Image (cartoon, rainbow, N blue to C red):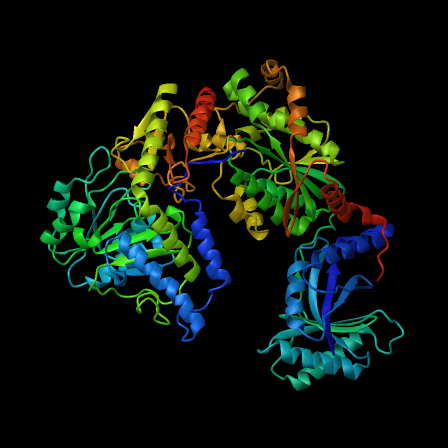
């Protein structure tokens, strides 16, 4: 008997003609995710499933490592460790299931057997296979009882290109394979919300790049490291992320000296959006992503959001807009960004906050108070040009040096990892 | 860009001699001193020689020197050992108001365990009032633990006078001195001054990180915190860190041999820096002791209208490294510097305070660079305040 993992994927089953492309994309994501984890990765297609065979030696360690990665690959809804049987003879199937149950469960449970067969020529239909397995199981394990409505354990026998038996399913993250949903640029602060917002969009298949505003000397290099660490944690799900570290001090100082202080935060946010949009265009992104949530702070009232939104032509998506803080924190904990987010380094948004920032800004008034900022275009261009770029992967990050061919090639590879393969045929 | 490292109270650059010894031991004489064969014996030679050299600096016998992983371990061992040994004496402990976390946190834990921790009052420079110490010593005082040179303000505590006073009033009390900032720079003679326990580390005197020592007065038996193979005369088990022990001794010897010249130079540079800075900029204050009374290598400055953390990052751009608060505590907002609070500074004043600390490699150029950078940066930062 061999062991392996059966991978179930969700929504992408429904994608009609694109289905093969989505499947291939998902297989590629699985392979990329497992690249540094196991030595050889062989993913085989089954109808509506993928199968990966475990090596005969070190099976348990392999299973553990692979399952850990698969739980972070968007598009997967279920991960099932399976026994693969020699043939589809009904005796083999029943014996295989009995062996599986005896091995995997110490205590008796209520159960129900589900059978599936892709070969419609098979002499028994699915119901008959399930009934046969169930009755033979009860002969051997009399303490177990059948419960067809609310079973504690669901036992599956699936007769496909191979014959699989299993009774445990680990939840996958769901969503769509990264890169199938286009590309978005995330405004990444050091806080709790923006990594979650990025993760949520990545879950819908969106490839990410990110922008972080660095206000040296008001924010320390440790704050920058913290943001890169957050990006690294998100990239465990979202694949490689190019993070732009934008020098923002000069722009902030200019606002501080020339604009009314209670409008400072809104004007600063508008500058950030202008810069982010420029970078998004360079990155061929189709949207901006922020971690804003209605009413959380003064700059996140609807009036404020309208004022910041007004500088962008690109759509701005705010996936946590209707979330309570606690809901966001729960996701942050689940995706392992929370502990990093709460490290106490000041970010650029908090260093010059007015005591009573306006919460109901009028767009006309904001535009008026921006007028003394005569060099906006030039400042923004300079900030974009002087940005540092970091290529962030789960394994770590490296700075992309300007005009360095090797670094540029690395970045291009990372972009390819995420997008090019939509039409690529993967050898199975 | 030239670096101007003015944060020598945080750590120091290992000396070339020290690095050479460490490399030699790692490459050639890497045996285990506990081994019976020649390779082990060769390594043991380094440990014995190091113990002798370090003992000489304290004018004591090598039997009193025990190697640890750092001064924090030394202080933990000293304090926890002292109260364990004195459990029949009482539960009263005296300390200063501005202790390093390596002492403060241990005493805090002891307080939770039912010990009475009492602080000795200090004058406006942070120096302990001997009259207050005398008054607070009791028959059930089990330990007095004091930092010799404060790591943030540079105030020097009168440990020379304290020992006799403590043992006269509380004969069974032990006296622990945290000498992390003073060892091999300032005179410290425990046998003469009646000090029972001393903590020190190598990396503040151009030695490696990860090695420290604990001086234990001869005849004093302390319980061990780390049990095992019985190294360090059964006091601190674990295979000896031979390369770093050798490096520690080399660095300490280099410092102590010339300590009068070296500390005089540090003192001169420091005084020059303060003098020129206060001439160049308004609103500069010295926190704690007067420049000439403090430890030669530490000065704490307060810059009106500038947050020291921002200033620290701005100075990075000129290759200048200084500290806001002590490196061990400045990463934790909400926990304000105890030594500065002991001087009566409020939260905002502490926020505007920075520490400049000198070492044997500093030169007049470092002072020039610092004064120039401050003269350029401080007025800019003063323009932008929190609203």
Judge whether residue A108 can be spotted in this image.
yes
Vertical arrangement, residue A83 with respect to residue B147, above or below:
below
Give B149 or B113, whichever is nearer the viewer: B149
Horizontal relation, residue B281 to residue A196: left or right: left
Residue at position x 64%, y 72% in the image = A60
Q: Is residue B46 left or right of residue A291?
A: left
Of the 4 image quadrants, the one containing the N terminus of chain B is top right
Q: Compared with residue B269, is residue A324 higher up or lower down, i.e. above or below? A: below
Which of the 4 image quarters holds residue A295? Answer: top right
Residue visible at 34% across and 51% down in the picture: B253
Q: Nearer the viewer, residue A301 or B275?
A: B275
Residue lying at the far bottom of the rendered structure: A139
* The one of A130 and A264 positioned closer to us in this rendering: A264
Residue closest to the far right: A121
The percent position of residue A102, horizontal first and vertical second, equals 64, 80
| Residue occupying image coordinates x 22% and y 32% | B124
Q: Is residue A151 visible?
A: no
The image position of residue B106, as x and y in percent, is: 30, 53
Picture coordinates of residue A105, whole percent (x, y): 61, 76
Residue at 45 percent across and 24 percent down: it is: B372
Percent from the top left, x then y, of residue A320? 61, 40
Left or right of B30 in this view: A396? right
Query: Is residue A368 positioned above or below B261 on the image?
Result: above
Marks counted in the figure total: 0
Quadrant location of the C terminus of chain B? top left
Name the residue nearer the viewer: A202 or B43: B43
């Amino acid at each position: 008997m061999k062991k392996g993992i059966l991978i179930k994927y969700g929504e992408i089953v429904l994608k009609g003609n694109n289905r093969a492309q989505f499947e291939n994309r998902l297989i590629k994501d699985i392979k990329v995710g497992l690249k540094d984890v196991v030595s050889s990765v062989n993913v085989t297609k089954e109808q509506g499933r993928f199968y990966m065979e475990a090596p005969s030696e070190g099976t348990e360690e392999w299973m553990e490592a692979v399952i850990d990665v698969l739980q972070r690959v968007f598009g997967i809804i279920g991960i099932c460790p399976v026994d693969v049987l020699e043939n589809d003879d009904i005796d083999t199937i029943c014996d295989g299931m009995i062996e599986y149950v005896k091995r995997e469960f110490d205590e008796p449970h209520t159960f129900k057997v589900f059978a599936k067969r892709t070969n419609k020529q098979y002499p028994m239909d699915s119901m008959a296979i399930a009934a046969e397995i169930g009755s033979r199981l009860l002969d051997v394990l009399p303490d177990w009882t059948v419960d067809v409505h609310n079973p504690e354990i669901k036992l599956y026998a699936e007769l496909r290109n191979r014959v699989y038996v299993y009774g445990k399913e680990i939840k996958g993250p769901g969503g769509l394979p990264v890169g199938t949903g286009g590309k978005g640029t995330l405004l990444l602060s050091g806080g709790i919300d923006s990594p979650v917002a990025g993760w949520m969009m990545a879950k819908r298949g969106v490839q990410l790049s990110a922008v972080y505003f660095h206000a040296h000397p008001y924010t320390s290099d440790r704050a920058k490291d913290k943001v890169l660490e957050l990006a690294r944690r998100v990239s465990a799900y979202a694949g490689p992320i190019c993070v732009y570290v934008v020098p923002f001090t000069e722009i902030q100082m200019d606002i501080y000296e020339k604009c009314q202080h209670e409008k400072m935060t809104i004007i600063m946010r508008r500058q950030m959006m202008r810069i982010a949009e420029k970078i998004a265009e360079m990155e061929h992104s189709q949207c901006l992503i922020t971690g804003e949530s209605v009413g959380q702070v003064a700059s996140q009232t609807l009036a404020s959001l309208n004022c910041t939104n007004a500088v962008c032509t690109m759509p701005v998506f705010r996936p946590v807009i209707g979330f309570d803080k606690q809901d966001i924190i729960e996701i942050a904990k689940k995706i392992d960004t929370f502990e990093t987010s709460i490290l106490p380094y000041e970010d650029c948004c908090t260093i010059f906050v007015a005591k009573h920032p306006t919460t109901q800004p009028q767009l006309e008034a904001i535009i008026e108070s921006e007028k003394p900022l005569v060099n906006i275009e030039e400042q923004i261009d300079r900030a974009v040009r002087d940005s540092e770029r970091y290529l962030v992967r789960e394994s770590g990050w490296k700075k992309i040096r300007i005009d360095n061919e090797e670094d540029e090639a690395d970045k291009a590879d990372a972009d390819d990892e995420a997008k090019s393969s939509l039409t690529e045929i993967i050898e199975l | 860009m030239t670096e101007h490292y003015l944060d020598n109270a945080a750590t120091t650059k290992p000396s070339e001699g020290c690095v050479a010894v460490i490399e030699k031991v790692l490459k050639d004489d890497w045996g285990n001193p506990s081994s019976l064969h020649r390779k082990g014996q060769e390594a043991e030679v380094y440990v014995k020689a190091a113990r002798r050299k370090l003992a000489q600096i304290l004018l004591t016998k090598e039997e009193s020197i025990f190697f640890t992983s750092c001064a924090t371990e030394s202080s933990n061992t000293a304090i926890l050992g002292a109260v364990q040994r004195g459990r029949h004496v009482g539960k009263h402990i005296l300390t200063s108001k501005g202790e390093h976390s390596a002492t403060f946190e241990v005493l805090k834990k002891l307080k939770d365990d039912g010990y009475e921790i009492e602080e000795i009052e200090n004058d406006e420079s942070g120096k302990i009032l001997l009259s207050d110490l005398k008054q607070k010593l009791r028959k059930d005082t089990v330990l007095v633990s004091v930092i010799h040179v404060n790591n943030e303000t540079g105030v020097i505590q009168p440990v020379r006078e304290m020992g006799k006073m403590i043992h006269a009033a509380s004969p069974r009390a032990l006296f622990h001195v945290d000498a992390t900032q003073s060892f091999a720079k300032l005179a410290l003679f425990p046998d003469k001054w009646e000090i029972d326990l001393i903590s020190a580390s190598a990396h503040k005197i151009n030695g490696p990180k990860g090695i420290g020592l604990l001086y234990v007065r001869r005849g004093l038996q302390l319980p061990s915190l780390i049990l095992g193979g019985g190294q360090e005369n059964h006091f601190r088990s674990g295979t000896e860190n031979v390369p770093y022990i050798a490096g520690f001794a080399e660095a300490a010897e280099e410092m102590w041999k010339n300590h009068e010249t070296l500390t005089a130079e540090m003192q001169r540079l420091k005084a020059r820096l303060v003098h020129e800075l206060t001439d160049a900029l308004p609103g500069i204050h010295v926190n704690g002791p007067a420049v000439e009374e403090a430890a030669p290598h530490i000065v704490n400055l307060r810059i009106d209208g500038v947050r020291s953390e921002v200033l620290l990052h701005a100075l990075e751009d000129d290759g200048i490294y200084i500290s806001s608060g002590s490196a061990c505590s400045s990463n934790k907002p909400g926990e304000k510097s105890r030594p500065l609070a002991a001087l009566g500074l409020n939260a905002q004043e502490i926020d505007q305070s920075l520490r400049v600390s000198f070492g044997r490699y500093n030169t007049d150029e470092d002072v020039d660079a610092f004064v120039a950078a401050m003269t350029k940066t401080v007025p800019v930062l003063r323009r932008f305040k929190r609203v």
